[in-house]
Image: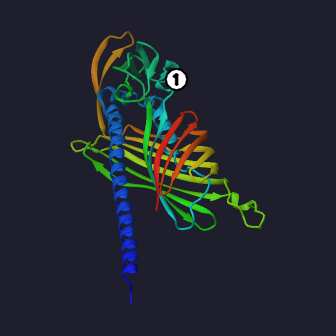
């Protein structure tokens, strides 16, 4: 016979289970929605970047033939460096792995601060075959810089006595459109404990088209393995192993991000692929309510920038004395296919508050672009 007290206890247990399951579901839905909102914000920034690349002001550089690769590489390098450093952040907030087949998921954002030195680069005529500084300062903005006050000129010899000439303003950057001088990325990461004191992490956002005529997709994975397990644990007076507070681990991770613009009226598109490989050692002091952690690592990027489409240019043909002879129109098809491979060492210090199923973490990484990372996590 089942007593009323047992029924009451079972009912309470069921209610607790329902409440817990409901809360976990709501948290996951909130997290996913916030992730989409954050991704859209990033897409707005990327869209501004793509508009800058696709603007008539910037397109003129494509007419400089082989010089365009060198110029755009210098112009875009801070953007790819910043995204690589942001992508490598937030993979861990402790060296201690989750217990086998236990789960947690983290939501946050990392922002790489742009040094003032990366907002411009020095233009030297001797570095280019056809590009020339016509007027204005030789300090030209990069994509993360401000407005440009420089005029450039393309001079392409034809037959020794004539030159194709095109004059235009150097492109500015998006600094004035950003709320802060940083390249930021959202983080949504699912972690699962594995046997052998290991942990696997997954970052995923399916390729999605947004109303801003842009698309984005993300895939990343990492694996962490405890080193502490190979050192003998201290024992109490009864010979029982004591709980370990200092932990060591190694971690490897990879993240790939695809962003770009969509074209509804012509074939002009911008496609950006960002790849980041991260190797790091982790040390942490893990206590009930707080974790202090540090990391030393190495990051390597492998990214591409493709600008596709057909671009028409009208050169002014001049003689060697600068006298106008005629105009000449040419087409440039798919002008850019560039690769960026930034690398760098990194050191991180962080703190995490552990509140039962809930945790809050923040860390700061010293590297070429100093990076701040903050987030919240849930254990399920």
With respect to residue 231, does 60 lie above or below? above
With respect to residue 333, does 123 lie above or below? above
Name the spot of residue 272 as percent of width and height, x first.
Answer: 40, 43
Q: Is residue 173 visible?
A: no
Q: Is residue 269 visible?
A: yes
Q: Quadrant of the N terminus?
A: bottom left
Name the spot of residue 365 as percent of width and height, x first.
Answer: 57, 38
Lateral position of residue 373 relative to residue 172, left or right: right
Name the spot of residue 257 as percent of width and height, x first.
Answer: 43, 48
Of all residues shown, which one is farthest toward the bottom?
1
State how many labels appear.
1
Quarter of the image for residue 44 reads: top left
Quarter of the image for residue 183 reads: top left
Lateral position of residue 32 relative to residue 109, left or right: left
Q: Nearer the viewer, residue 181 or 339?
A: 181
Q: Nearer the viewer, residue 69 or 39?
A: 39
What residue appears at the point 55 percent right and 63 percent down from the top-left corner? 193
What residue appears at the point 56 percent right and 61 percent down from the top-left corner? 98
With respect to residue 135, does 338 lie above or below? below
Of all residues shown, which one is farthest toward the left?
265
With respect to residue 62, does 268 lie above or below? below
What residue appears at the point 57 percent right and 42 percent down from the top-left corner? 350
The residue that disc 1 covers is: 127
Q: Nearer the viewer, residue 212 or 93?
A: 93
Name the spot of residue 123 as percent of width and height, x first.
Answer: 48, 20
Q: Is disc 1 surrounded by few (<14), some (14 to 19) or many (20+) residues within 10 Å?
A: few
Q: In what element is the residue under mark 1?
A: helix
């Amino acid at each position: 016979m089942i007593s009323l007290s047992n029924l009451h206890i079972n009912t309470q247990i069921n209610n607790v289970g329902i409440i817990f399951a409901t809360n976990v579901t709501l948290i996951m839905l909130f997290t996913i929605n916030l992730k989409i909102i954050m991704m859209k914000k990033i897409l707005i920034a990327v869209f501004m970047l793509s508009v800058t690349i696709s603007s008539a002001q910037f397109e003129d550089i494509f007419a400089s033939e082989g010089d365009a690769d060198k110029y755009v590489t210098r112009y875009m390098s801070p953007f790819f460096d910043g995204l690589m450093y942001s992508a490598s952040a937030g993979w861990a907030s402790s060296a201690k792995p989750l217990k086998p087949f236990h789960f947690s998921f983290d939501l946050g954002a990392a922002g790489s601060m742009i040094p003032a030195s990366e907002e411009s680069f020095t233009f030297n005529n001797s570095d280019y075959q056809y590009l020339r500084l016509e007027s204005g300062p030789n300090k030209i903005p990069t994509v993360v810089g401000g407005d440009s006050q420089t005029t450039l000129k393309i001079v392409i010899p034809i037959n020794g006595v004539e030159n194709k000439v095109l004059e235009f303003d150097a492109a500015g950057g998006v600094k004035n459109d950003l709320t802060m001088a940083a390249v930021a990325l959202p983080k949504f990461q699912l972690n699962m404990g594995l046997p052998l004191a290991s942990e696997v992490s997954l970052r995923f956002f399916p390729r999605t088209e947004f109303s801003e005529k842009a698309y984005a997709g993300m895939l990343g994975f990492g694996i962490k393995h405890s080193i502490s397990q190979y050192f003998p644990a201290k024992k109490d007076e009864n010979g029982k192993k004591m709980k370990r507070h200092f932990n060591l681990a190694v971690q490897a991770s990879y993240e790939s991000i695809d962003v770009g613009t969509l074209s509804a009226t012509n074939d002009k598109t911008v496609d950006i692929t960002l790849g980041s490989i991260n190797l790091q050692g982790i040390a942490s002091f893990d206590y009930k309510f707080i974790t202090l952690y540090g990391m030393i690592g190495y990051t390597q990027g492998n990214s591409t920038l493709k600008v596709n489409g057909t671009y028409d240019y009208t050169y002014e043909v001049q003689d060697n004395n600068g006298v106008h002879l005629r105009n000449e129109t040419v087409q440039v098809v798919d002008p850019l296919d560039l690769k960026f491979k930034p690398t760098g060492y990194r050191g991180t210090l962080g703190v995490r508050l552990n509140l039962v199923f809930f945790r809050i973490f923040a860390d700061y990484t010293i590297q070429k672009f100093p990076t701040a990372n903050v987030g919240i996590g849930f254990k399920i």
